[in-house]
Image (tube, grey):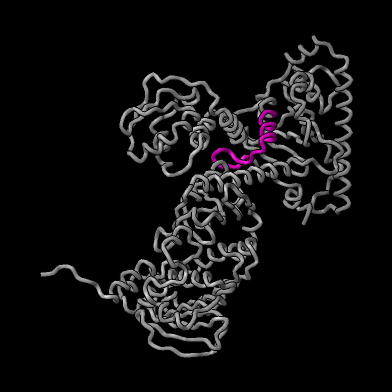
Amino acid sequence: MAKINVLTSDVYNKIAAGEVVERPCSVVKELVENSIDAGASRIEIAVDDRGAGSITVSDNGCGIDEEDLSLAFLKHATSKLSNAEQLDGIETLGFRGEALSSISSVAKVQLTTKTPFADTAVTVEVEEGRIVSKNYCSANTGTSITVSDLFYNTPARKKFLKSPSRESSEITQYIARLILANDLLEITYILNGKDVYRFKGGGAEEAIYCVYGADCLKNCLQICSEYNSVVVKGYVGSPEYTKANSTYQTMSVNGRYVRDVTIQSAVKQAFSSYLMTRSYPFFVLHIQLPFDQVDVNVHPSKMEVRFADKHKVFTAVHYPIKQALKKFTEQKVDSILAADSQSEQATPLEYAKPSVVQADFFKDLDGFNGETMSPGQRDAVDKIEQSDQAEERGKAFDKFVQRMSNISVEEILRQQTAHVSHNTPGLLVRDDSSETTRKNVAPEPKTVYVDMEEDFVAEKEEKEAEEDLTYRGVRILGIAFNTYLLLEVGENLVIIDQHAAHERVLFDKYMANIGKLPMQDLMFPYVFTVTEQEAEHIEENLPLLKEAGFDVKPFGTNTFRISSVASMFVDMKLDKFVSFLVSSLGEKIESKQLLKEAIAKRACRQAIKAGYTLNNTEIRYIVKAIVDNKALQCPHGRPITVVFSKTQLEKMFKRLV
C-alpha cells in the first residue's frame, strides 16, 4: 500500500503560508514592502481588531496591470525577478513571489489597483488563492489591499494569536521601524480608527522625533561615514542616554529593516567603555553597500542577511561610532572646563584655595535671611563678600611673592619638615584653630591665608614641575567623605568620584601599553581543547593574540597551548580568558577589545578606594589626568563626574525663581 501522498495545492499553500504569514504583523510587513517596491512615496496602513479583523494598506505606487491580476496571486509569481542570476544582487525588498499567494490562502483579500495609463481602476476579490469576482471602479493611481478574516480557514493558527494588545503592539513596533528605516517615505498608521503615526517623510531627525520624541533626538549623535564602499549613516544615543533593553535599536541594510549580529556587535563594542552592565545603547543606523555583497535570501521573513565580508561591515560601523563617542566626551569635558567668560585669565590650579568665612561675617546681618533680603540687598552682600575675598587673596599672594624672593634653601627645607600632614579629611585648607597647625606655623599675624603660604613654600618644586596645571580655571575646593573631589570650574561645581577617576586613569594607561609589555613564561603551560569551529576561529586570530600578549600555539587536533603571557596578565585565570575568546566566534575581535574586561578588572582592583585620604599631589594628579584624557565614565560605564551649574544651585537656594 502506497505511503507517499502528493499534497493538493490548498494544503501545501496553507503550509507554506505558515512560514510567510506568522501573525497579523507579517501581513502588514509583506504588503508594505510591496508598496515600497512599487515606487510609492505615500503609504497608509489601517488596522482593526489587532489585524484579525481587517488590515488595509494603500499606496500611490505604479499599480498592477489588469492582465497581471490573474497571475499576482499564484505561487512564485513576481515582477521583481526574471532569472537566477538576479539573485546575486537583489535590489528589491520582495523577490520570492510568495506574499500575495500566502496571504490569500489564509484570509479574504480585496485588491483595488490602477496604473497611470489605465482609464479605470480594477477591483478583485480573492479567496483561498483564487479570484472570485472582478469589477471596475474609480480610484487614484496606486494599489489598495484589504485583508480580512485572517486565518478563517486555519483555526489552529487563529487560536494561537496573542492578546489584542500584544498583536497591536507588534504592528505598531513594526511601523515605527518602518518609519525609522524609510525616513523619506510618507507613512500614516491608523489603529482602530485612531491615528498613531502621521509621518511626513522629513528625514532621519524627523523620524526619530516622530517615534521617540524630542528628548531622544536631543541626546543623539550623528554618524556619517564611508569605508570600502560601505556607507553608514544615522544616529546613536549619547553615553548618557541608555536603555534597559535592545528594543530601541534599529538597523537597515539597503533600505531593508533587519536584525544582524555583526552590526549589533560593532555598536556594542564601540560603547563598551561607556555603558554599565545591563545598559544598551540607542541607535538608528542605515548601512548601504553594493547589492552583490549582501545575501538577503536567508529566511522567509527576510529579516536576516549575510555579508560577503562581515569584518568590513563591522569596521565600517564600529569606528565612526567610537570616534563620535570620543568627540562627544571631549566636547562635554571642554564645556565643563571652559573658563569663566568674565575672568581675565584662568585661575592657576595650585593657587586656588577655598576661602574661609570670617566668624563675624554675619553679625551685621541680624534679622536678615535669604527670604527677607531684597534683590538689591542680596546683590550688595554678594559684591561685598566677593570684594573682601578678592582683596584678602591679593594681599596674601603679594606677601607670598615677597617672601619667596628672600627665602633661603635652609628655610625651604625647614618649612618642608614642618609641613602638616594631610591625614585630616575635608577641605585642602586646614583649620587654623587646630593644635597641629599652631605648632608648625611660624608666628605671624593671624590671617586665613597663613597655611596657604606655607603650602606654597613646601610644594615649590612640585609646582614648578606641574606648571601645565595652571589653566582652565580649575579650582580645587576640597574632598567630601574622603571619596568625592569638589572642583569649581567656571560656572560649574564639579564632583569627581576619586575611585572611578583613578580606575579610568589606570585603565587608559594599561590599554595604551598592550603589545608593549615584556612576555613571561608560564611555569606550567596552559593547554585547552575546543571544537573544530572554535579552533578555526582561534587559528585565524593567532597573530592578534600574540599582539595582545598571549603566546598561543597549536598543540594537536583542536588543541592549543599558552606557554607565555604578557607580564600584566600572569595572574589572569586563563580558563575564563579562553571562554571569552571562543564566545566571540563569528565576530571580529581586536587585541584591545579582547582584553578590555580583564584590564578593567585589574584597574578597578588597583585604583584608590572610596574612603582613602588623598594628599594634595594625588588630588592634582587625578584632576590633571581627567582633564587631559577627557573621560566621563570608568571602564565599567559608571560616571566619573557629576556637574551642578551655578544656575542650578541658585535655583536650589531660591536665589532664582
The total of numbered circles placed on residues is 0
Residue 133, how many percent across, how many down?
A: 40, 88
492 relative position to 184: left or right: right
Residue 230, how many percent across, how many down?
A: 56, 51
Q: Quadrant of residue 95?
A: bottom left
Q: Residue furthest top?
A: 410
Q: Nearer the viewer, residue 523 or 459?
A: 523
Magenta stretch: includes residue 97: no
Q: Nearer the viewer, residue 165 or 47?
A: 47
Q: Which residues are magenta?
A: 620-640
Q: Nearer the viewer, residue 80 or 580?
A: 80
Residue 186, how many percent across, how many down?
A: 60, 71
Quadrant (top left/top right/bottom left/bottom right) for the C terminus: bottom right
Residue 268 appears in the rendering = no
Residue 333, how many percent across, how many down?
A: 70, 41
Q: Quadrant of residue 533?
A: top left
Q: Quadrant of residue 208?
A: bottom right
Quadrant (top left/top right/bottom left/bottom right) for the N terminus: bottom left
307 relative position to 238: left or right: left
Magenta stretch: includes residue 636: yes
Q: Residue furthest left?
A: 1
| Vertical arrangement, residue 562 with respect to residue 271, above or below | above
